[in-house]
Amino acid sequence: MSVETAPSIRPDYDPRLTNQDLAPLEKQSWSSYNIFAFWMSDVHSVGGYVTAGSLFAFGLASWQVLVSLLVGIVIVQFFCNLVAKPSQVTGVPFPVINRAFFGVLGANVPAIIRGLIAIAWYGVQTYLASQSLIIMFLKFWPSSADLNDTRFLGLSLLGYLAFTLLWVAQAMVFWRGMEAIKRFIDWAGPAVYVVMLVLCVYLVSKAGWSNISLNLSEGKSLDFRHSVTTMLSAIALVVSYFCGPMLNFGDFSRYGKSFKAVKRGNLLGLPVNFLFFSILTVITASATVPVFGALSTDPIETVQKIDTTFAVLLGGLTFVIATVGINIVANFISPAFDFSNVSPQKISWRMGGMIAAVGSVLLTPWNWYSNPDAIHYTLGVLGALIGPLFGVLIAGYYLVAKQRVDVDALFTMSPEGKYYFHKGYNPNAIWATVVAGVFSVASVLVPKALLDLDITSYDSTWITNYSWFIGCGIGFLALLSFERRKPLIAE
């Protein structure tokens, strides 16, 4: 913990709720560029590229994909600003600010849910990055192909080697602390942009601009009505993809020197940055058709097809760095704070992150993520679990508490404490989460189950794309309803 982000721990703070990582910051020094770089690391990843490219499978034209991506990211920006303010103003991370709404002990509910989700995604992103590393191994050490043929528990020996190397590298960056992470993401995001531009220019020059068609839609052309509904689904998919880091964005906005600086960073890092990234993605994917004879929406696959040693090395390393960046900011830091919040004196920030790292291996992500539909289905489940927590947080802070938070009360276990509620839990927030969670998870599981069991022939799985919105909306309204019936937060 550096001097510039030193925490302020008062003697009367209860140790059961406090440690160096959870206490409010005394100084907040992150500029707009630091927030901008955070989002560059979050956007410029293999997962982000594949998600953007996968929208063409919906049958949308290129301009419709771009519009969907931009509208979706503007929605993300709006909600990120909402989440950013309470943590920036108070200087505390996501699990701590939730004590004001869930109770000093009840805040462990959203913390554990978010932490478990991060574990799953941490493994997936590490696995995706390891595929880039495997390409480099095979290119520069052809004899390693033998290791790639021998499989154990669903993964080759070369795969285990690549996964382990990245797992250790990420842990080393994380272990050095938040300042080291900030320095890493400050240069990682821009570095990826440079290589993305080089890749795009190279492919376009090989293909010739006249041979590039931006109409990459797959399948039949859609009429107006279906175009609108499909674009709405694509927009929802974009929001779902970012809903994880969007929920715990307070873990980063707490370091912002001002809320104005955070908002400026969000503007540059989300709609401005994402629009440019999306245009690069579309043009690069378009160029793969004339160059390779088939559409490629996977950057790893694209780099692999370029028969140039330098290109494979540069591209492979870049996508490794990009994915490491998003993994650390989205799936390492979040559980670090979340699990530390459960037992501050026994679980430090570093230990919380390592719990997530170890858990990600035990989930063997290479097995459950191999399904071609997994990216859409996983995003639906993720959104279903995160949406209710988001709705409760926003309703609690902006409408019920009216943006007033007693920071010192977040760290007391006294029964007279403002956020002790009922034995440390706010039943209104807990029940709002349960009610919203039932509906949002059902929106993901029920439509698919009805088809699989041949109960109906009507395909209603499109509802899954809106699981985050369903959970967020119901959680928001449920907390307002419960608090009006029996006020606890505003008392």
Image (cartoon, rainbow, N blue to C red):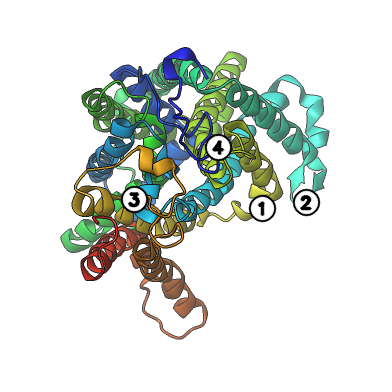
**Amino acid type for the residue under numbered disc 3:** Lys
Residue at left offset 23%, top offset 71%: 485
> Mark 3 or 4, which is nearer the eye?
3
Q: Is residue 137 left or right of residue 16?
A: right
Q: Is residue 224 left or right of residue 24?
A: left
| Residue 153 numbered tag | 2
Residue annotated with mark 3 = 418
Label 2, residues with CA under 10 Å away: few <14, some 14-19, many ≥20: few
Which of the 4 quarters of the picture holds residue 463? bottom left
Horizontal and vertical percent position of residue 241:
40, 46
Give the mark nearer the N terminus: 2 vs 3.
2
- How many angstroms separate mark 1 from mark 4 (CA)? 25 Å
Q: Residues within 10 Å of mark 3 (few under 14, many from 20)?
A: many
Q: Which residue is situated farthest in the left direction here?
A: 224
Residue 161 percent coordinates (x, y): 76, 32
Residue hosting label 1: 367
**Residue 297, which numbered label?**
none
In the picture of the structure, the residue carrying the numbered disc 4 is: 336
Q: Are marks 1 and 2 in contact (CB under 8 Å)?
A: yes
Q: Is residue 265 visible?
A: yes
Question: Which circle's residue, 3 or 1, is located before the other in the chain?
Answer: 1
| Amino acid, disc 1 | Asn
* Marks 3 and 1, how far apart at CA: 46 Å
Tell me the mark number nearer the camera, choosing from 1 and 4: 4
Relative to residue 125, is residue 361 drawn left or right? right
